[in-house]
Amino acid sequence: MITLLIADDHPLYRDALKGALSLSLPELTLREAGDLSSTVDILNTEDVDLLLLDLHMPGSNDLFGLLHIRKLFPDLPVAVVSGTEDSTIISKIVSVGALGFIPKTTSATDIAEAVQAILDGDVWLPENLADIDDVDEEFSVLADNVASLTPSQYKVLCYMRDGLLNKQIGYNLDIAEATVKAHVTAIFKKLGINNRTQAVLIASQLELEPPSQ
Amino acid sequence: MITLLIADDHPLYRDALKGALSLSLPELTLREAGDLSSTVDILNTEDVDLLLLDLHMPGSNDLFGLLHIRKLFPDLPVAVVSGTEDSTIISKIVSVGALGFIPKTTSATDIAEAVQAILDGDVWLPENLADIDDVDEEFSVLADNVASLTPSQYKVLCYMRDGLLNKQIGYNLDIAEATVKAHVTAIFKKLGINNRTQAVLIASQLELEPPSQ
DNA sequence: GGTCGCATAAGACTATAGTCGTATATAGTG
DNA sequence: CACTATATACGACTATAGTCTTATGCGACC
């Protein structure tokens, strides 16, 4: 028996996905989650064979959510579902270890086919982007480093990317400016850099979104 | 009589372009330039009806070179020639006012056709990218602001984007750190921002390259 | 030839960034 | 339980960023 977890904040789209899958692959057990933390909860308590992950989910923060799950469950196959069609972003998603990318415009039959392919161990991508095989090594290292950040450090990095001062970040997170600075220094060490500018560039390359809090 | 200026630092590719054009459009007058300053010189002294501009030219600094020429000669039709195939970059090129984008892989007959179309007042893009019509208004404003920077300010911005400290920038440009700071402040005002982080994000969005000396 | 605008240059000063040391709580380990 | 490692937190200190002011050179324009 194969278990599949659908992680998407939109209940209607979850239903649509379930419909598409149950028609073609009725033997699947389907589970659902609406945000990143409940996704992690389910992955911790149940055996899941494939995760269908929406990038724009509460608590997910785009690529960070994927990085987070890849770090927690390195052996879990993950397919990303998103409305994006941008090839550079899709290339990053694949670099970070996703076994598939399914645009939200994909038809029901194609979705079922994609899920079957990924369950069989293949990588599935939209036809027009099948040539994305050049996994950017440098980007992967970067992504791993960012994945090693603690939740607090990640939030600080996101605010940094928005151009906020340490003082403003501290106000937003309700901590002292000194603490923000400590986080900033820790981020520098983990990313192997030594100033804010470089951190911001890395964050923007990762297409990170600010904490949805 | 129609005059066309080929601006590309690679003499062999200039010859190839000339060959492609003289076969199909023998009535053209062709001029050549190998860097940005000589391009500007020719545009200042002669009547040119169309500029074929290579983005990766000495002194050009990618999009900045295009911005610069667009600012100096707003009425001059410009077609960009580049090895890039990245649709987001091509979209930016079009946003900045180029009337065409010709990948370096384009065949001789297609190049001649493209040049003819642009001379006729059309916009020419590679077939697979013909749907780039969504000129990003916000990006255009940004590009205009960056185009208004002086050469010194632009160099400082490029070094900022590389994560250099003011002191290091001053050393590279052989000016005092205080002067760098003055440039930085001027950049903030022109871009409507108030700290380095925001400047760096804008610079990276413009795909700016560091000064090639 | 003055003078206006502006790019460049730089010193003095203030604000912010970044480092260091330290403390607490928590989770895992022998 | 004691020991270790790490995330979080903060104050004090130093380095850098950023502001303000002034000065000079250069081209445009009466």
Image: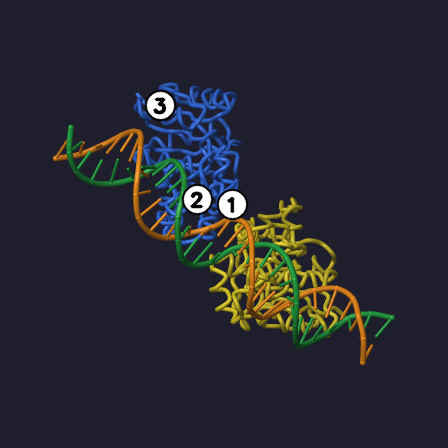
Chain colours: A blue, B yellow, C orange, D green
Between A54 and A1, the one lying in front of the other is A54
Which class describes the residues within 10 Å of circle 3: few (<14), some (14-19), or many (20+)?
A: some
User: From the viewer's perspective, is A198 left or right of B139?
Assistant: left
* Disc 1 from disc 3: Cα separation: 37 Å
Residue position for label 2: A92
Residue B29, image quadrant:
bottom right
Name which of mark 1 and mark 3 comes first in the sequence. Answer: 3
In the rendering, at what x and y percent does residue B10 appear?
Answer: 54, 70
Q: Say which of marks 1 and 3 sits in front.
A: 1
- The tag on residue A5 is none
In the rendering, at what x and y percent does residue C3 appear?
Answer: 80, 70
Answer whether residue A104 is visible to the viewer in this image: yes
Callouts 2 and 1 close, C-beta under 8 Å: no
Which chain is mark 3 on? A
Answer whether residue B16 is visible to the viewer in this image: no
Which chain is mark 1 on? A
Quadrant showing the N terminus of chain B:
bottom right
Q: Amino acid at mark 3?
A: Ile
Q: Amino acid at mark 1?
A: Leu
Q: Amino acid at mark 2?
A: Lys
Residue position for label 1: A165
Residue position for label 3: A42
Between B18 and A170, the one lying in front of the other is A170
Looking at the rendered structure, whether the residues under marks 1 and 3 are on a common chain is answered as yes
In the rendering, at what x and y percent does residue A22 appear?
Answer: 42, 19
* Disc 3 from disc 2: Cα separation: 26 Å
Which class describes the residues within 10 Å of circle 2: few (<14), some (14-19), or many (20+)?
A: many
Which chain is mark 2 on? A
Q: SS for tag 3?
A: helix
- The residue sitting at 58% across, 68% down in the picture is B8
- The residue sitting at 43% across, 44% down in the picture is A92
